[in-house]
Image (cartoon, helix red, strand yellow):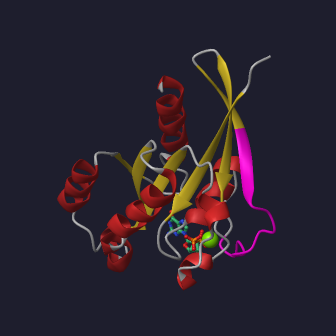
Amino acid sequence: ELEVAIKVVIVGNGAVGKSSMIQRYCKGIFTRDYKKTIGVDFLERQISLGGEEVRLMVWDTAGQEEFDAITRAYYRGAQACVLAFSTTDRDSFEAVRSWKKKVEDECGEIPTVLVQNKIDLADHSVVEPEEAEMLARSLGCRLFRVSVKEDVNVGPVFRHLAACCLEE
Ligand code: GDP
Ligand code: MG
C-alpha cells in the first residue's frame, strides 16, 4: 500500500507556541510547562485525506531558534512549512519574513501557511487583524488564526498543508 509521508517544519521566534502546537496536534494535549527539549526530532500524526492515508511528520526545533542555530538537518527534505507568530509578541510578527527566507534558502518554494497563535489573548493583541492579512497576502500564503491552548483551528492548518502537498 502506498503511503504518503510529509515532513512539516514549524518556524518562528521562541515562545510563539511551536512546540505546543506540535504536541497539541500530534498528542492532543496542551501543557503549560511543556519542555523545550522533547528528546525527539519530530512527532507524527496520520490523517486520511481524499481517500489517501497521509503521515505528517512535524518537526520541532528544540529551542535553537533563540540562538539562530537551526541546523540544515532540521530543514532538509521539508515539504511544507508553518510560519508562526504570536498575537502578543510584536517582534515575532516582524520576524516572519526572515523566517520565510531561511526556509526558502534551504528548501525552495514549498507549501507554506502563516499562523497567528494565541488568539485566546486577543484582548492583549499587538498585531492588527489587517496587518496579519496583509502580510499573508504579500507572502502568498493563507492565514490561520489559532489558539493552541483552546484547541482552535490547529487541525485545519495541517490538513491544508497536506492537501497542498497532495495536489503537487
Ligand atoms: P516555542 O518556543 O515556539 O516552541 O513555544 P512553546 O510551545 O514553548 O510555548 C511558549 C509559551 O506559550 C508556553 O508557556 C505555552 O504554554 C504558551 N502557549 C502556547 N500556545 C498558546 C496559546 O494558544 N495561548 C496561550 N495563551 N498560550 C500559549
Ligand atoms: Mg519550542
Which quadrant of the figure has residue 19?
Answer: bottom right
Image quadrant in which you'd find residue 7? top right
Considering only vertical position in the picture, is 152 above or below 37? above
Is residue 90 rendered to the left or right of residue 105?
A: left
Tell me where residue 117 appears, x and y as whole percent.
Answer: 44, 61
Which of the two residues, 18 or 69, is positioned nearer the viewer here?
Answer: 69
Q: Residue at x 51, y 63 (%)?
A: 11
Q: Is residue 163 above or below residue 19?
A: above
The residue depicted at 56 percent of the width and 85 percent of the height is 67
The magenta stretch spans residue 142: no
Left/right placement of residue 37 relative to residue 50 reads right
For the point 39% across and 74% down, the residue is 92
Q: Name which residue lies at 42% across and 66% down.
A: 99
Q: Is residue 62 visible?
A: yes
Which of the pair 76/132 is nearer the observer?
76
Q: Main secondary structure of the magenta part?
A: loop
Give the extent of the magenta segment: 32-45
Q: Position of residue 88 (x, y in %)?
A: 37, 74
Nearer to the camera, 50 or 128: 50
Quadrant that contains the N terminus:
top right
Q: Is residue 78 left or right of residue 147?
A: right
Q: Position of residue 23 (x, y in %)?
A: 68, 57
Residue 38 sits inside the magenta stretch: yes
Count of numbered circles on the image: 0
Q: Residue furthest bottom?
A: 67
Nearest the viewer among 137 and 103 is 103
Task: Confirm whether residue 27 shows in the render.
Answer: no
- Ligand 1 lies in which image quarter? bottom right
Residue 68 lies, in percent from the top left, at 53, 80
Instruction: Answer above or below: position of 33 versus 116.
Output: below
